[in-house]
Image (spheres, grey):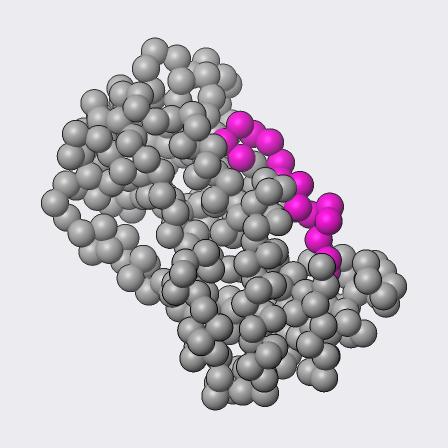
Amino acid sequence: MPELPEVETVRRGLNQLTLNQEITGGDVLLDRTIAYPFSVGEFINGIEKSAIAAWHRRGKYLLAELSSSSGWLGVHLRMTGQLLWLNRDEPLHKHTRVRLFFGDRQELRFVDQRTFGKIWWVPPGVAVESIITGLAKLAVDPFSPEFTVEYLASKLQNRRRPIKTALLDQSVVAGLGNIYADEALFKSGILPETLCIDLQLKQIELLRTAIIQVLETSIEAGGTTFSNFLNVKGTNGNYGGVAWVYNRAGEPCRVCGTSIQRIRLAGRSSHFCSQCQTLRGVRRHD
């Protein structure tokens, strides 16, 4: 599933390529991709003849501010969604779900193999959170000034749940997912099974710093591609080649050489180095 760096990579690409061009029409090939409104015709009519003024990101959601007071366009890529900026005569991928036409030749194409991705049109004058209800449940963004050590400590301390599970909770940290939770825990020297209640304040401080650093590094690399993720130009992300632990089970740790381990935790894979990550350690891996 695309996480914050992948969604941010897409957002930046969309802001470079799609702004201030009139949406001349569209085609919905899978009706259930449109989460709102319930009429495909109303969706197309709502966005037609408007333009995208700016793309924003909230957690893993993409939000396009439409010009001429035309409301908002919302997108969640979910597990396999891709937004691709293509020439309109480009052959259709068999998993193409929605096409938005711009000008005479370009289109923004939503491709989604697993069909879990969603698109919303929020009419003007309507609160975005009232239509895209998942937004109201999001915690602060890791790049927000509100993401302080004190904030993170208030979300974690006195909680009897594994730290890895807590980091995947979007009401704790918005946008963080399985890949970057593993990476941040490695950089902060914390085992994924460590209970939140057992964390010291110094460890939480290191964890906050590690989360930000890992996300920044991945954004610079264009995100991670292990299966489906592509940026808007159809290019893979490169972070996977430098990942500390994620998807590296059985390979040597880049710091100490110990074999990376993989366990299941709350139904998700967790990767870690038993030597570098320990409750006693508050190491930092730069």
Residue nearer the viewer, 133 or 279: 279
Instruction: Please say if 251 is above or below 102.
Output: below
Residue nearer the viewer, 90 or 104: 104
Determine if residue 4 is in view: yes
Q: Tally the numbered discs.
A: 0
Determine if residue 112 is in view: no
Q: Quadrant of residue 22?
A: top left
Taking the spot 71% from the left edge, 59% from the top edge, the residue there is 286
Q: Which residues are magenta?
A: 231-245
- Is residue 86 left or right of 278 when viewed as pictured? left
Is 104 a magenta residue?
A: no
Q: Quadrant of residue 11?
A: top left
Q: Which residue extends farthest left? A: 125
Instruction: Please say if 150 is above or below 158.
Output: above
Instruction: Please say if 285 is above or below 38.
Output: below
Q: Quadrant of residue 245?
A: bottom right
Residue nearer the viewer, 146 or 47: 146
Residue 95 horizontal/vertical position (percent): 49, 34
Residue 51 horizontal/vertical position (percent): 26, 26
- Is residue 274 left or right of 152 when viewed as pictured? right
Residue 178 horizontal/vertical position (percent): 58, 61
Residue nearer the viewer, 172 or 280: 280
Instruction: Please say if 282 is above or below 235.
Output: below
Taking the spot 73% from the left edge, 49% from the top edge, the residue there is 242
Residue 256 horizontal/vertical position (percent): 85, 66
Taking the spot 28% from the left edge, 32% from the top edge, the residue there is 53
- Is residue 268 left or right of 256 when viewed as pictured? left
Q: Which residue extends farthest right? A: 257
Look at the magenta stretch and give its main secondary structure. loop
